[in-house]
Amino acid sequence: MLLLNYKETPEGSEESRWSDANKAAFLKAVKEGGKGLVVHHFASAAFTNPNWKEYEQAIAGGWRTQGYHGPKHEFPVKKTGVKHPVSDGAPVKFDHVSDELYSASLRTRGSLVLATAYCDPTKPQGTGIDEAVIWVNQYGKGRVFNNVLGHDTVAMSDKNYQQWMRRGVEWAATGQVDASSK
């Protein structure tokens, strides 16, 4: 299983950048090798300038070039009606601690949105709609779990966020979630 929490930077050292061989190995591991993939927060914005289209497909979308967010704030997260091993047994709704609420996330064809958060239009850059925050998809033989929550340690300390993340990691790695996984 692979967990991405990566965003390349032009200022980064050469050693911190993915080579063409790294990119090919990553795609092959997920698409052909069936490695599970967990995409965490801003990793969905990696490789956008120029846009690496195959990475976008592999991670099931995300921030990419059209995404944005307002200031960090508390907001409720709610489970959708989609039946899936990750969401079965996860909290139906929880008040999430201060975090960035991504808006306009791209989702690739076949993505199943498991959780959303209402983007309050009275807040800066509020859209007035439920924004996807957790979704799943397949990339070749690999299972993909994309969670755009978790900007910092405050956001990641939320016990409900942790439960969703644990369940997503377990599903990406094995294709199932232990019913007792909390």
Image (cartoon, rainbow, N blue to C red):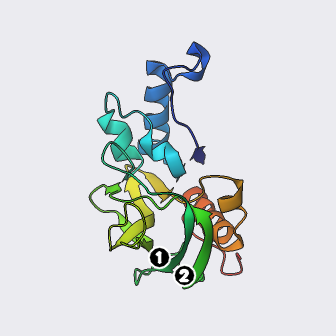
Q: Amino acid at mark 1?
A: His
Q: Residue 42: x percent and y percent?
A: 51, 46
Q: Along the line of sight, which residue is nearer the eye, 180 or 48?
A: 48
| Label placed on residue 84 | 1
Q: Residue 114: x percent and y percent?
A: 44, 73
Task: Residue under label 2, please give it.
Answer: 88
Quadrant containing the C terminus in the rendered view = bottom right
Q: Is residue 118 above or below residue 140?
A: below
Q: Along the line of sight, which residue is nearer the eye, 55 or 32?
A: 55
Q: Is residue 2 above or below residue 83?
A: above
Crowding at mark 1 (Cα within 10 Å: few <14, some 14-19, many 20+): some
| Label placed on residue 35 | none
Local secondary structure at mark 1:
loop
Q: Is residue 53 left or right of residue 139?
A: left
Counting the numbered discs, the total is 2
Q: Are marks 2 and 1 in contact (CB under 8 Å)?
A: yes
Q: Amino acid at mark 2?
A: Asp
User: Which residue is drawn at the image coordinates 47% and 76% (left, top)?
Assistant: 84
Q: Along the line of sight, which residue is nearer the eye, 97 or 82?
A: 97
Q: Is residue 62 left or right of residue 34?
A: left
Q: Is residue 149 left or right of residue 129?
A: right
Given the current orientation, which residue lies at the most extreme left position?
109
Q: Is residue 120 above or below residue 107?
A: below
User: Which residue is drawn at the image coordinates 57% and 69% (left, top)?
Assistant: 176
Q: Along the line of sight, which residue is nearer the eye, 18 or 65?
A: 65
